[in-house]
């Protein structure tokens, strides 16, 4: 296998230390961008040490949003077992936004996938006569999965592998051992280990403290891995004295200690890394052709975020608002679309389990310029979301409903305009007299929860003469879905008479993919997730439409 790969690709392994949530994903995406600036092709793997097959059944408050890929992947650990995977880690959203590439679900490797495939193979008799162990059987399977991604045509110049969690976590040990083996097999000229750590600033003594980074690197070294580069997250740029100290104790040259300070625009990070010389350092280590990075278009895009001169407030009523990463792609899609209009976004989170009455929500929404009714599942917080949609309906506040948000905004219309008291989704009320949202027929026989929804990319047929068609400027689109329930056509036909129009369906015309109000400045609900296809240099038309409507509403609201 190694002979067939020759000298391609080069491997960049990204590990994290001190604590989680310090930006390994953005760092990995930014390093990928450094290579793209120089015309090298890249591919990214994310390793998640949890035992879930994929994050599809995880609570967003615990793990952040579930990112959905365009393609679905049938994971077959052994013959006779298969799982459909399209739901992957939220970091892949960052990878796609930075690189402009669509990822494949096989690029997200979890402990659950690895252990299950080995255990099931043992039950099939694949290891007869041998004791199945972490080393070599688990580590070999990890390496095989990595090489499977590498060998997909076209083979990339650079493969980046982010190891989830923190060095020292028990769950990550087999993956780090697999990385050690790959580094040993390929040599230092084809591999680089980039370690991301936190360097806290202690205000009481006015000093950056490097000891946590030193301990983190020593833990990594004890596992047989020497970092080639240390990325130091801190409140501000590290002074040279701190860099020198880290270099000394971590056994790397001074120039390979890279400062990563807090920045207002995350897309600035690749440019910041260029200023630190990181791109040239990695190119030199790999013995690649030295090329001048082409950063012009990326710099112009970043500048559009920095020069915004208007601020609009978008309310996000929902049930996972205690963790901003629950809606990471939505947050970024809003920010990216606002920058296109020279504006900034202020997101107002509204926890609808607590804020669920007409009185409190009128107060919460009295000075917002638009509403994004969020996706989700289950009963908690639903009445607050329906109430927020009802206020937007009556007050003419621009509203975009995503997936569950589209379903619940339709419930609000049914209750307020159609006077169907008790109208609901059967996900919450199975005995509703007006079940305007119900389980899809093909879902009614499904008992398993993981990987069984309507997932991945599907064609969307957009109906001419609608606001949605005006936004897209085309009859067909391809969007990403993640749902079990859908809007019911026989009720929508009656709602059409009062102004709620179906504006998009699937390729068969059977599934309703979008609805909109004809007598409202901007009221659109979509069953799909447009945020997953929005890019900083190419914001999604729906998010651009919401921002444009919010800016117009803001002018009208300020005049009042």
Image: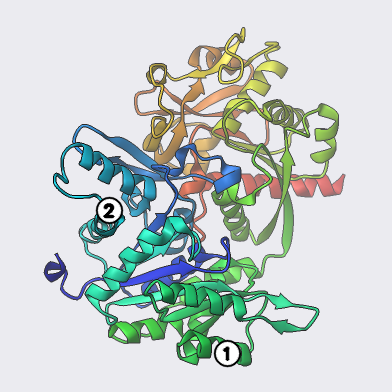
Q: Is residue 383 above or below residue 316?
A: above
Residue 125 showing in the rendered view = yes
**Label disc, if present, on residue 65 of the rendered structure:** none
Q: Could you give the CA–CA distance between mark 1 and mark 2, rounded to whole angstroms? A: 40 Å
Instruction: Please tell me which residue lies in front, 8 or 547.
Output: 8
Residue 558 coordinates in the image, percent (x, y)? 84, 49
Location of the C terminus (image quadrant): top right
Residue 152 coordinates in the image, percent (x, y)? 21, 57
**Label disc, if present, on residue 245 of the rendered structure:** 1
Q: Residue at x 31, y 76 (%)?
A: 191
Q: Is residue 476 above or below residue 490?
A: below
Q: Is residue 553 above or below residue 214?
A: above
Tally of numbered discs: 2
Q: Which residue is mark 2?
A: 133
Instruction: Please tell me which residue lies in front, 99 or 280.
Output: 280
Q: Secondary structure at mark 2?
A: loop
Q: Nearer the viewer, mark 1 or mark 2?
A: 2
In the image, 11: left or right of 210? left
Q: Residue at x 42, y 40 (%)?
A: 479
**Quarter holding residue 155:** bottom left
Residue 555 coordinates in the image, percent (x, y)? 78, 49
Q: Residues within 10 Å of mark 1 (few under 14, many from 20)?
A: some
Question: Which tag, 1 or 2, sits closer to the chain's start?
Answer: 2
Question: Which colour style is shown?
Answer: rainbow
Instruction: Please tell me which residue lies in front, 44 or 136.
Output: 136
Location of the N terminus (image quadrant): bottom left
**Quarter holding residue 363:** top right
**Quarter holding residue 310:** bottom right
């Amino acid at each position: 296998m190694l002979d067939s790969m020759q000298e391609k690709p080069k491997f960049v392994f990204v590990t994290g230390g001190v604590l989680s949530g310090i930006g390994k994903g953005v760092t990995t995406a930014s390093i990928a961008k450094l290579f793209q600036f120089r015309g090298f092709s890249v591919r990214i793997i994310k390793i998640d040490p949890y035992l879930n097959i994929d994050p599809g059944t995880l609570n967003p408050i615990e793990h952040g949003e579930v990112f959905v890929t365009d393609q679905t992947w049938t994971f077959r650990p052994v013959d006779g077992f298969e799982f459909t995977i399209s739901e992957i880690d939220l970091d892949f959203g960052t990878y796609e936004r930075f690189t402009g590439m669509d990822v494949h679900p096989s690029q997200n490797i979890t402990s659950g996938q690895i252990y299950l495939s080995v255990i099931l193979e043992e039950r099939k008799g694949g290891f007869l006569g041998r004791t199945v162990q972490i080393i070599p059987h688990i580590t070999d399977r990890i390496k095989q999965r990595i090489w499977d991604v590498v060998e997909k045509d076209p083979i990339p110049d650079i493969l980046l592998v982010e190891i989830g969690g923190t060095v020292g976590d028990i769950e990550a040990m087999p993956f780090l051992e697999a990385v050690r083996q790959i580094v040993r097999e390929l040599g230092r000229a084809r591999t680089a280990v980039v370690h991301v750590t936190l360097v806290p600033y202690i205000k009481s003594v006015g000093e950056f403290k490097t000891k946590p980074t030193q301990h983190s690197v020593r833990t990594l070294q004890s596992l047989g891995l020497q970092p080639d580069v240390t990325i130091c997250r801190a409140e501000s740029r590290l002074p040279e004295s701190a860099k020198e100290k880290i270099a000394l104790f971590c056994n790397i040259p001074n120039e390979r200690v890279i400062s990563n300070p807090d920045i207002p625009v995350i897309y600035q990070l690749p440019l910041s890394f260029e200023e630190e010389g990181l791109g040239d350092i990695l190119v030199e280590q790999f013995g690649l052709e030295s090329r001048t990075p082409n950063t012009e278009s990326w710099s112009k895009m970043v500048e559009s975020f920095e020069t915004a001169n208007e601020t609009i407030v978008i309310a996000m009523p929902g049930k996972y608002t205690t963790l901003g990463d629950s809606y990471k792609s939505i947050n970024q899609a809003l920010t990216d679309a606002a920058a296109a209009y020279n504006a900034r976004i202020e997101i107002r989170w509204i926890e609808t389990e607590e804020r669920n009455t007409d009185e409190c929500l009128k107060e919460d929404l009295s000075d917002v310029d638009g509403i994004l009714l969020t996706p989700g599942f289950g009963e908690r917080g639903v009445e607050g979301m329906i109430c927020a949609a009802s206020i937007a309906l009556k007050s003419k506040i621009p509203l975009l409903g995503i997936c569950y948000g589209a379903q619940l905004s339709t419930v609000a219309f049914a209750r307020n305009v159609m006077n169907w008291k008790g109208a609901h989704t059967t996900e919450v009320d199975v005995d509703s007299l007006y079940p305007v949202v119900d389980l899809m027929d093909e879902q009614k026989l499904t008992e398993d929860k993981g990987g069984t929804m309507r997932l991945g990319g599907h064609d969307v047929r957009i109906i001419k003469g609608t606001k949605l068609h005006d936004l897209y400027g085309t009859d067909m689109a391809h969007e990403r879905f993640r749902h079990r329930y859908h809007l019911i056509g026989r009720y929508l036909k009656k709602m059409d008479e009062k102004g709620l129009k179906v504006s998009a369906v699937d390729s068969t015309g059977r599934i309703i993919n979008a609805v909109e109000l004809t007598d409202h400045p901007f009221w659109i609900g979509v069953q799909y997730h447009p945020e997953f296809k929005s890019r900083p240099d190419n914001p999604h038309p729906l998010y651009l439409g919401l921002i444009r409507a919010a800016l117009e509403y803001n002018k009208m609201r300020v005049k009042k």
